[in-house]
C-alpha cells in the first residue's frame, strides 16, 4: 500500500499507524505545491530540503508528514558543534575505560562487557536500523542543517546515499555492527521501507553542491490572509467559517502589521501569531480594560495592539511600529 | 512516446551551465517521471511536467525563478506543438485520445478540471498503481508563471534582473572559500583523547583521570579590503557575490570587511559610502596579524591607464601589510589581458593577483592558506 501525503492535517484511514508511529495530531495545512513536493520526494525517497523564513512551519512539516503517513518520527536537531556521526551512533569509550578499570581494581574474575554494550545509536542510526531489521520506514527530521559546521552536509552525503553505516569501534569483531537499510537492493525496490528525510534550512549557509543535487527542494512561502485564518481555525479546533470574530480580526491586524515596511529586525511569523491569538483569547487580564471588543481591536493603531510583545521581539521593531502609527 | 529527452534537454543544459547542481541522474529521473505522467494522460500533463522538473532541478528560489523563465521559453512552445499538429505523434501512444491535453498549453482556461477543489484525490490516479504518488489537483490554469512558487506577478514593466554568468558561479565560489580553513582544537574539552589517556594509563598503571581535548574548529580569519566607487562600480554584482559567498560560506571564525578607494592608504572605511574611517595601522593590527587578507580591486585596469601614484601607494600599503601577515591575495574583476599596460600589471608584480573565475579563486585561496605563488600576469 502506497501512502501519500495530503496535507490536510488529518490521517486518512488507509494510513494505519505503523509500530512506533508518531501519533500526535498536527493541525498542519500544506499547500498543494508542497504536497506535490513531499509526494515526489517520498516516491523517489530523496531527501526533501525545505527552506523558508523563520516561523513558517518548516519543522512542523516533518511532524505533520510523520503523523499523516503513520510513520515513526526521528529527530536530529543540529547544533553548531554537531557532527554527522553523532546522529548515527556514540561510542562511550570513557565508560568502558572506567568499567575495565573497576574490574581490574575490584574483581579480577568479573567478565568485561562486550564492546557493543557501549554503543548508543543516534536517531539517524535508529532510523536505518529500523528499516533494515524491522522493515519499518520513518520520517527523519534534520533540523536547521545550516547551523552545523560546513562539513556536516558533506559528511551526511554518504549516509543519505547509501543508507548504511558501521560502528568503527566494533568493526573488528566477527559480528561487527553494520547497518544497511538498502540491503543491497535498489532504492526503488526498498522504497516503502526506507527512512524519509526532511531537512530544514534557514539559508544561513550555502549548502554544498553535491548535497543539493540529491535533494528535492521546496521553499515554503509565507501564508496569505485566508490561509492564516485557516491555520488559526485548525489550531483553535474550529472550522474556518465559525472562527471567533476576535481571532478573525486578529489575523487581519497581524497581516497589516507584517505588511508595514519598516526595517524589520525580526518579522513576526505564524508561530508568533498563534501565540498572540491565544493571548488575546485570554483577555481581559488588565484591569483597566473591561473586555476586548473586536471593534476596538480592529481600530486600535498597530502600536497600541494588546500583547504586542508576543509579536515584536526587538526594541527597534517596537519603536518603528509605534512611530509609524 | 513523446520524445522528452529532446524536449527537456535544452532546458537542462541551460540550467546546468548556469551552475545549478545537476547530474545526469537528475535528467534521466525527470525523463522517467515525465513518461510516467504522460502514460497516465490526463488534463495537466504540461503543468505536472513543469512542477516535477522544477522540484527535481531547482535548488533555491533564484534557481526557481530562472527555471520558470527558461521553461516558458524553451519547453512550453515545443510542448504546444503536438496539440496543434496531432499528426506528429503516433496515435497509439495516447490511450484515450479525447483526454489529450488540448489547449491548456496555450494558456487558455481549463474549466473542465474535475472537482479540482474537492479534498478527494483526483480520480485519474485511482488505478494508477505504478504511479504511487499523485500531484494535487491544481486550480490555476497554466500561464507563464501560474505555478511558480515565487511570488512574481506577470508585469508589463520591463525589469532588468542582472545575474552572474560564466565563469562566475556563486556555488563554485562557496566551494572555493570552504577550503580556506585552519583547523585548531578550541573550546571546552569534551572529547576523550584516547591515545593520551592510554599513554597516561601505561605510565602510571592506574587510571587517575581521563584526558580530554577540545574539538577541531575552523579558526581561519579573514580581512577583506574592498575597493569602492569609481571604476569599481560596474563590478558590484560580482563583488556582492564574492562577499555573500564568503559570509554565507559560513566557515570562517571571523570575517572583517573594510572599504577603500583606489589604493588603501591612511584610512580604511567601515561603510561602503567611505565613512566611519579607521587608521590603517589599527585595522591591520587588529584584524590582519597572522590572518588572511583579501584585497578586491581593479588596480587601475578598468580605466586601462598607468597611474604611478597609485602604484606607489599600493606598494607602500603592501610593505606595511607584510609586516603583519604574509597571507594576502588580490582579486581583480578584470581578466588578466586587461591588466597589461595598466597599473594593474605593475601591481601584480608584487602582489599575488587573480581573476576570480574558478581557477583564480582556488589559486587565491591557496595563497591565503600559505602556499607559495608566482608573481606577475599569468
Image (cartoon, rainbow, N blue to C red):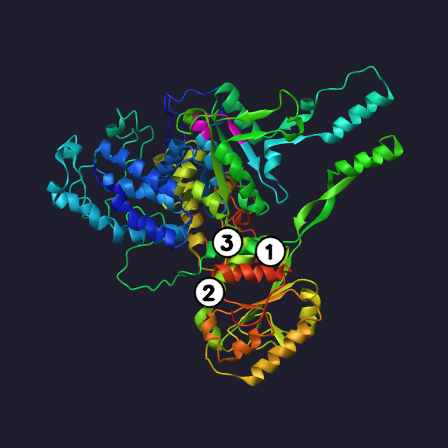
A224 vs B41, nearest the viewer? B41
Q: The residue marked by circle 2 belongs to what chain?
A: B
Image quadrant assignment for residue B320: bottom right
The kind of secondary structure element at disc 1 is loop
Q: Which mark is residue A304?
A: 3
To which residue does mark 1 refer?
A: B180
Q: Could you tell me residue A138's position as x and y percent?
A: 48, 27
First to last magenta residue range: A66-74
How crowded is the residue under tag 3: few (<14 C-alpha within 10 Å), some, or many (20+)? few
Residue sitting at x 24%, y 46%: B142
Query: How far apart in space, not on screen, are marks 1 and 2 (Cα)?
Result: 20 Å
Nearer the observer: mark 1 or 2; the answer is 1
Marks 2 and 3 close (CB-CB < 8 Å):
no
Q: How many marks?
A: 3
Q: Could you tell me residue A284's position as x and y percent?
A: 53, 41
From the viewer's perspective, is A273 left or right of B149? Answer: right
Q: Could you tell me residue B59's position as x and y percent?
A: 42, 47
User: On the same chain: label 1 and label 2?
Assistant: yes
Marks 1 and 2 close (CB-CB < 8 Å):
no
The kind of secondary structure element at disc 2 is helix
Does residue A171 show up magenta in the picture? no
Q: The residue marked by circle 1 belongs to what chain?
A: B
Nearer the observer: mark 1 or 3; the answer is 1
Is residue B287 visible to us here? yes
From the viewer's perspective, is B23 left or right of A147? Answer: left
Amino acid at each position: 500500500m502506497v501512502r501519500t501525503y495530503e496535507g490536510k492535517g488529518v490521517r486518512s484511514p488507509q494510513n494505519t499507524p505503523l509500530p512506533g508511529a508518531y501519533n500526535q495530531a498536527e493541525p498542519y495545512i500544506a499547500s498543494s505545491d508542497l504536497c506535490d513536493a513531499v509526494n515526489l520526494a517520498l516516491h523517489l525517497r530523496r531527501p526533501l530540503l525545505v527552506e523558508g523564513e523563520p516561523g513558517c512551519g518548516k519543522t512542523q512539516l516533518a511532524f505533520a508528514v510523520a503523523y499523516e503517513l503513520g510513520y515513526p518520527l526521528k529527530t536530529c536537531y543540529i547544533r553548531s558543534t554537531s557532527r554527522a556521526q553523532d546522529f548515527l551512533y556514540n561510542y562511550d569509550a570513557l565508560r568502558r575505560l572506567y568499567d575495565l578499570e573497576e574490574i581490574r581494581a575490584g574483581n579480577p574474575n568479573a567478565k568485561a562487557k562486550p564492546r557493543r554494550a557501549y554503543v548508543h545509536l543516534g536517531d539517524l542510526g535508529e532510523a536505518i536500523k529500523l528499516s533494515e531489521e524491522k522493515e519499518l520506514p520513518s520520517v527523519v527530521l534534520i533540523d536547521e542543517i545550516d547551523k552545523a559546521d560546513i562539513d556536516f552536509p558533506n559528511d551526511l552525503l554518504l549516509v543519505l546515499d547509501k543508507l548504511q553505516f558501521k560502528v568503527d569501534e566494533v568493526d573488528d569483531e566477527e559480528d561487527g555492527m553494520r547497518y544497511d537499510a538498502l540491503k543491497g537492493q535498489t532504492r526503488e525496490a526498498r522504497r516503502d521501507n526506507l527512512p524519509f528525510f526532511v531537512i530544514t534550512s534557514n539559508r544561513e549557509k550555502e549548502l554544498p553542491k553535491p548535497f543539493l543535487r540529491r535533494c528535492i527542494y521546496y521553499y515554503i512561502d509565507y501564508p496569505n490572509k485566508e490561509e492564516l485564518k485557516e491555520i488559526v481555525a485548525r489550531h483553535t479546533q474550529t472550522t474556518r467559517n465559525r472562527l471567533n470574530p476576535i481571532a478573525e480580526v486578529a489575523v487581519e491586524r497581524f497581516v497589516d502589521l507584517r505588511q508595514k515596511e519598516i526595517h524589520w529586525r525580526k518579522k513576526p511569523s505564524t508561530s508568533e501569531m498563534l501565540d498572540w491569538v491565544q493571548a488575546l483569547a485570554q483577555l481581559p487580564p488588565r484591569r483597566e480594560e473591561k473586555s476586548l471588543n473586536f471593534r476596538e481591536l480592529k481600530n486600535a493603531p498597530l502600536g497600541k495592539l494588546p500583547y504586542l510583545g508576543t509579536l515584536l521581539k526587538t526594541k527597534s521593531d517596537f519603536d518603528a511600529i509605534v512611530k509609524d502609527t | 512516446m513523446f520524445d522528452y529527452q529532446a524536449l527537456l534537454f535544452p532546458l537542462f543544459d541551460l540550467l546546468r551551465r548556469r551552475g545549478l547542481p545537476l547530474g545526469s541522474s537528475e535528467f534521466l529521473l525527470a525523463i522517467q517521471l515525465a513518461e510516467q505522467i504522460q502514460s497516465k494522460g490526463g488534463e495537466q500533463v504540461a503543468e505536472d511536467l513543469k512542477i516535477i522538473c522544477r522540484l527535481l532541478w531547482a535548488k533555491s528560489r533564484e534557481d526557481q525563478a530562472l527555471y520558470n523563465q527558461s521553461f516558458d521559453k524553451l519547453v512550453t512552445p515545443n510542448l504546444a506543438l503536438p496539440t496543434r499538429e496531432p499528426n506528429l505523434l503516433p496515435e497509439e501512444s495516447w490511450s484515450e485520445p479525447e483526454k489529450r491535453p488540448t489547449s491548456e498549453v496555450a494558456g487558455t482556461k481549463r474549466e473542465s478540471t474535475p472537482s479540482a477543489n474537492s479534498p478527494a484525490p483526483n480520480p485519474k490516479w485511482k488505478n494508477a498503481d505504478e504511479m504511487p504518488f499523485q500531484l494535487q489537483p491544481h486550480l490555476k490554469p497554466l500561464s507563464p508563471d501560474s505555478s511558480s512558487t515565487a511570488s512574481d506577478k506577470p508585469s508589463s514593466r520591463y525589469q532588468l534582473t542582472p545575474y552572474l554568468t560564466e565563469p562566475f558561479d556563486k556555488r563554485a565560489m562557496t566551494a572555493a572559500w570552504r577550503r580556506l580553513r585552519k583547523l585548531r582544537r578550541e573550546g571546552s574539552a569534551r572529547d576523550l583523547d584516547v591515545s593520551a589517556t592510554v599513554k597516561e594509563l601505561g605510565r602510571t598503571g592506574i587510571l587517575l583521570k581521563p584526558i580530554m581535548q577540545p574539538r577541531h574548529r575552523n579558526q581561519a580569519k579573514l580581512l577583506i579590503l574592498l575597493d569602492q566607487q569609481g571604476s569599481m562600480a560596474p563590478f558590484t554584482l560580482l563583488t556582492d557575490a564574492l562577499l555573500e559567498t564568503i559570509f554565507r560560506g559560513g566557515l570562517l571564525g571571523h570575517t572583517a570587511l573594510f572599504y577603500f578607494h583606489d589604493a588603501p592608504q591612511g584610512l580604511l572605511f567601515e561603510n561602503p559610502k567611505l565613512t566611519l574611517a579607521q587608521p590603517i595601522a589599527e585595522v591591520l593590527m587588529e584584524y590582519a596579524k597572522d590572518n588572511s587578507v583579501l584585497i578586491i580591486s581593479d588596480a587601475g585596469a578598468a580605466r586601462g591607464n598607468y597611474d604611478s601614484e597609485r602604484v606607489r601607494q599600493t606598494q607602500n600599503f603592501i610593505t606595511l601589510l607584510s609586516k603583519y601577515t604574509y597571507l594576502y591575495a588580490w582579486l581583480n574583476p578584470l581578466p588578466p589581458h586587461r591588466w597589461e599596460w595598466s597599473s594593474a600589471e605593475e601591481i601584480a608584480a608584487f602582489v599575488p593577483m587573480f581573476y576570480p573565475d574558478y581557477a583564480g579563486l582556488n589559486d587565491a585561496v591557496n595563497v591565503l592558506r600559505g602556499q607559495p605563488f608566482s608573481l606577475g600576469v599569468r
